[in-house]
Amino acid sequence: MININKTLLTSVMGILLLSGCLEPKTESIWEVETRFVLDTSGFCRFVDIHNDTAYVAAGQAGVQIWDLNSVTKIIGLDQYSASQDLSDIAQIEYAPTVKKIFALENNSRVVIMDVIHGDSLAVLGEEMSEKTREIRILEGSESYIILAADNDDGLKWNKFDYFADWGIWSNVAGDELSTPGKPMGLDYLDGNIALAVDQQGVELWRLDSLGADPVFVNRLDTPGNAEKVTLTETGLFVACDDAGARHIPLAAFVESTGRTEPVNPYTPTQFAEDLTVDHIAVSGDIAVLSVGGKGIAIYDISNPRSPEPRGIFDVGYTYYSTFWNESLVVCTREGLIILNIIQ
């Protein structure tokens, strides 16, 4: 028995030594290259980009407007801090048709600003409720809608029309559509509204026309808490906090007809389970996960049912990212970082 154990031990040690000599597989790891960094002074929490202009929510440093083509030159910077009841801005949306900025702190009302001459702002007022967590702006030619994930009221929307005779915008319609969960985030694409409802998972709603009530489709559970959601043409990517990320095909949702099983047996995919995911940006076959103090995690989603990790990159404490042309724009505590992803 002793000789057998010695032989087994020798074999195991040989295998371990051989394994230690093998080169780690690096061909699946991509690289990131920093193009430039914009110093936003405050924590850069969110950015909305239109025509190479970045509208930045810079935390306590306020609302900022940057020209990305001039790299570090600020073409417009107007800060609104505690004196304007905006002490830590978390999200910003720019509506190019009506030329307005919508700024938001967590659990606050939406502050609406006019953009004047492209480089200065005028505060017009506040809308929505005190528990607004995330918004999207939908525009018509002479109207716009604020869609809101309201942590108290559910899915909320208000429609505003422009009355030329008086030169004012007025709230003409709206509704509050209750949900059993606590809405944390939302996204909109091609008539679909995705709502992240914390412990209750994620909901899909359908909007047939501007100014109509969204119609509930279905609710699906997620591991962990659904905090943010990103809509694509084929499905949802859900940031599930410390449970990682989840991809749910649109076909997994069915109309609310009393059914409990999807029409198409498409199974949602959980990935990045070892990460705490705050947001997911998607472009083509690339998903970029914002993972807080670890920076960003990049995944190849050419097969969304089997995302492949392509590396974790410490670019600073990351809140949010989005794509701009061929580059990735990352919102961090160190500022707004523009990267190239090298495959």
Image: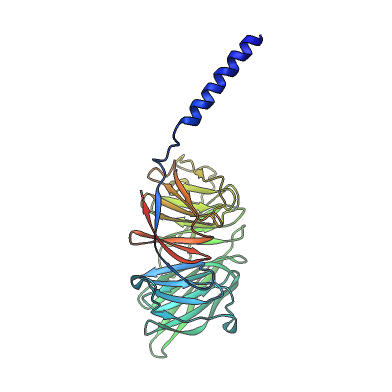
Mark count = 0
Percent x, y for residue 325?
Answer: 33, 62
Colour pattern of the rendering: rainbow
Q: Which quarter shows the N terminus?
A: top right
Q: Residue pushed farthest bottom?
A: 166
Task: Judge whether 318 appears above or below 44 on screen.
Answer: above
Residue depicted at x 42% and y 90%: 166
Task: Judge whether 293 appears above or below 63 on screen.
Answer: above
Residue depicted at x 60% and y 70%: 107
Residue depicted at x 48% and y 72%: 40
**In the depicted view, which residue is nearer to us: 199 or 165?**
199
When asked about the image quadrant of residue 33, the answer is bottom left
Percent x, y for residue 131?
Answer: 61, 70
Percent x, y for residue 46?
Answer: 49, 67
**In the depicted view, which residue is nearer to us: 58 or 10?**
10
**In the depicted view, which residue is nearer to us: 226 or 129?**
226
When asked about the image quadrant of residue 101, the answer is bottom left
Q: Residue pushed farthest right?
A: 2
Q: In this view, does 23 lie to the left or right of 179?
A: left
Q: Is residue 199 left or right of residue 237?
A: right
Percent x, y for residue 209?
Answer: 40, 66
Q: In this view, does 325 lie to the left or right of 254?
A: left
